[in-house]
């Protein structure tokens, strides 16, 4: 009896001490050094609760400057975690040369084991955050460091060829240039400092001491790119999914990942496809049963396109905003501290359903009850523009084909969609597509106004039969929700470069004039097309500058300036049943 009373008192004392530690201001240590296995010094800021601990560790490794992550450092320490915020190799306070993906497997392993052994740490490490910081987690997890207990990758990729740098064989030009351009600033700063013995706080830097500035400096020149972002040129030099990309492939290493994870995807995010693949791949193939059963998925709205109530031109209601820091900490409250929050409800998937604008828990992704429904393309040969006769119907038929001329000198402009990382010059998210739909090189197929709500939730594919006058071209598809007032709001989209229709590991030229089947991955959505709305599909051959222009010659825009117009034809007759395949949720 006395022994039980003593245990209860001891437990109460421990709980009181823990609560006091959480309520006190965190202890902060700046630029704590760590040596990698090859001798490079990386630096981290550490936020921990007052008291001796030990505490579970939450580690993030970022190329975007750890100084900007102090809010989650303080919030995490207040919840009882030891927060370790580290600059990756070659970024900000850390030493070394920056090259995306190259060192993250080894450096990530080393950082996890180092963090687990820090004073006041309890040996259990979780990782967190998004975009490239999701890559630092996934790549570290491949090496399965012994003390890594979980990861929380937010809006990140699964294959750095197919859903980071390329998509369907097309170069992700807007993202690759804007992301690389932003990263190059810190690289430039470091090179100037190294060449001049200056400090970044100096008002005037002697730029002429930096070799790049000895001649006229053109920031867009190959010389500048080679000096500031050599990886960009390597990406262009590797358009195929070859060994350069496979050395960092997450998809090919799912069995090597042995920890639970919370994957956060977003409907209008540039990495939506990769985030969903990571959840599905690890749920099926992670290296042990605990990891397979420990996969969670949350799908929000915007991601890189924005996380507020309004994303793009659409108000998604008061329940839409996503608090990233709270979600991360709630996940680790559940996983590391045993708190019974929403992650303990037995349903591993939580999605935001657009149209109805509400959150919903699900047992799995994709939804088992979804019914793949073919909406066949139809017209009398005049589907060009939204004023044409293009239609979507659930009954196949024999119809005339539709033809348009794709001119690389006048590509279809990108209007919203999953973009990153310069919203000032090209706004992302859901936006009215009327400008694109007025072009004769855009084919538009629509249902009549719906007589009842129709939910589409899950992966979406465009099965297209088409031919071209050129030896290569692109085909694009875009799913659109048409409002009763005429607004045509994009939901999700995809592209396929004709020479990569069979595989991205090799190119197979097309024969001009020959019909081929193109299966275009439009990724996924969850949207209720409300009564009175119409389902619409746009088909074209360009989406620029999100993707580079296909020159229609079989050559890359990276090493050729010659281009030709292509006459492209979409067929939808009994022998060529082109169709949009939608996962419809029964009512």
Image (tube, rainbow, N blue to C red):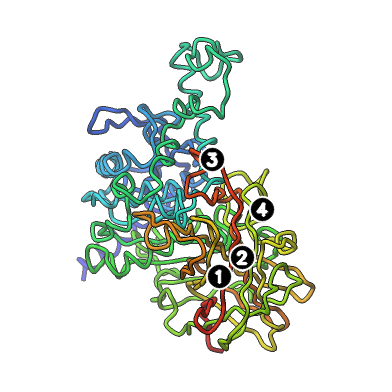
Q: Is disc 2 placed on a helix, strand or loop?
A: loop
Q: Is disc 4 placed on a helix, strand or loop?
A: loop
| Foreground tag (4 vs 3) | 4
Cα separation between marks 4 and 1: 28 Å
| Foreground tag (4 vs 2) | 4
The quarter of the picture where the C terminus appears is bottom right
Label number found at residue 452: none
Mark 4 or mark 2: name the one nearer the start of the chain. 2
Mark 4 or mark 3: name the one nearer the start of the chain. 3
Residue 99 in the image, given as x and y percentages of width and height: 38, 35
Horizontal relation, residue 349 to residue 374: left or right: left
The residue labelled by disc 2 is 320
Mark 4 or mark 1: name the one nearer the start of the chain. 1
Circle 3 packing at 10 Å, graded few (<14), some (14-19), many (20+), is some
Cα separation between marks 4 and 3: 17 Å
Q: Is residue 86 visible?
A: no
Q: Is disc 3 placed on a helix, strand or loop?
A: helix
The reply to whether the C-beta atoms of the residues labelled 4 and 3 are less than 8 Å apart is no
The residue labelled by disc 4 is 413
Circle 1 packing at 10 Å, graded few (<14), some (14-19), many (20+), is many
Horizontal relation, residue 568 to residue 115: left or right: right
Cα separation between marks 3 and 2: 30 Å
Circle 2 packing at 10 Å, graded few (<14), some (14-19), many (20+), is many
The reply to whether the C-beta atoms of the residues labelled 2 and 1 are less than 8 Å apart is yes
Q: Quadrant of residue 434?
A: bottom right
Label number found at residue 177: 3
Label number found at residue 352: 1
Pick the front one: 550 or 86: 550
Cα separation between marks 2 and 1: 8 Å
């Amino acid at each position: 009896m006395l022994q039980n009373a003593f245990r209860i008192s001891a437990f109460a004392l421990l709980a009181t001490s823990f609560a006091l530690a959480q309520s006190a201001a965190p202890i902060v240590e700046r630029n704590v050094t760590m040596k990698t296995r090859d001798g490079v010094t990386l630096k981290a800021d550490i936020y921990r609760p007052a008291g001796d601990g030990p505490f579970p560790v939450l580690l993030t490794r970022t190329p975007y400057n750890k100084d900007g992550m102090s809010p989650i450092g303080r919030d995490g320490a207040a919840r009882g975690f030891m927060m370790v915020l580290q600059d990756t190799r070659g970024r900000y306070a850390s030493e070394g040369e920056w090259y995306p993906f190259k060192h993250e497997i080894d450096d990530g392993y080393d950082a996890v084991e180092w963090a687990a052994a820090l004073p006041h740490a309890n040996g259990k490490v979780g990782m967190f955050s998004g975009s490239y910081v999701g890559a630092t987690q996934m790549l570290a997890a491949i090496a399965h460091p012994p003390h890594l207990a979980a990861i929380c990758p937010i809006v990140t990729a699964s294959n750095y060829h197919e859903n980071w740098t390329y998509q369907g064989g097309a170069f992700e030009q807007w993202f690759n240039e804007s992301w690389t351009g932003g990263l190059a600033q810190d690289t430039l700063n470091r090179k100037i400092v190294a060449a001049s013995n200056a400090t970044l706080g100096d008002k005037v830097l002697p730029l002429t001491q930096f070799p790049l500035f000895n001649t006229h400096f053109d920031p867009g020149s190959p010389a500048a790119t080679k000096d500031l972002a050599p990886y960009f040129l390597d990406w262009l030099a590797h358009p195929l999914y070859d060994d350069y990309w496979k050395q960092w492939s997450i998809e090919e290493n799912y069995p090597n990942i042995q920890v639970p994870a919370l994957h956060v995807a977003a409907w209008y995010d540039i990495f939506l496809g990769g985030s969903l693949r990571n959840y599905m791949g690890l749920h099926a193939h992670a290296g042990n049963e605990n990891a397979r059963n420990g996969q969670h998925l949350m799908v929000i709205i915007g991601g890189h396109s924005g996380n507020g109530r309004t994303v793009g031109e659409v108000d998604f209601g008061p329940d839409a905003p996503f608090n990233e820091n709270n979600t991360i900490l709630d996940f680790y409250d559940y996983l590391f501290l045993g708190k019974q929050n929403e992650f303990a409800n037995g349903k591993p998937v939580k999605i935001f359903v657009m149209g109805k604008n509400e959150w919903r828990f699900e047992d799995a992704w994709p939804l088992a009850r979804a019914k793949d429904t073919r909406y066949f393309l139809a017209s009398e040969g005049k589907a060009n523009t939204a004023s044409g006769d293009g239609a979507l119907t659930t009954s196949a038929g024999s119809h005339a084909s539709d033809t348009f001329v794709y001119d690389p000198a006048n590509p279809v402009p990108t209007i919203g969609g999953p973009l990153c990382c310069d919203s000032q010059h090209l706004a992302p998210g859901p936006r009215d597509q009327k400008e694109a739909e007025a072009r004769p090189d855009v084919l538009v197929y629509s249902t009549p106004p719906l007589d009842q709500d129709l939910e589409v939730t899950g992966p979406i594919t465009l099965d297209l039969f088409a031919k071209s006058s050129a030896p290569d071209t692109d085909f694009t598809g875009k799913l659109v929700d048409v409002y009763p007032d005429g607004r045509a709001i994009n939901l999700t989209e995809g592209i396929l470069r004709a020479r990569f229709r069979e595989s991205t590991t090799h190119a197979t030229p097309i024969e001009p004039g020959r019909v081929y089947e193109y299966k275009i991955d439009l990724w996924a959505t969850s949207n209720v097309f409300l009564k009175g709305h119409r389902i619409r599909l746009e088909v074209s051959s360009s989406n620029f500058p999100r993707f580079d222009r296909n020159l229609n010659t079989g050559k890359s825009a990276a090493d050729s300036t010659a281009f030709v117009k292509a006459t492209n034809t979409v067929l939808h007759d009994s022998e060529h049943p082109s169709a949009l395949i939608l996962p419809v949720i029964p009512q």
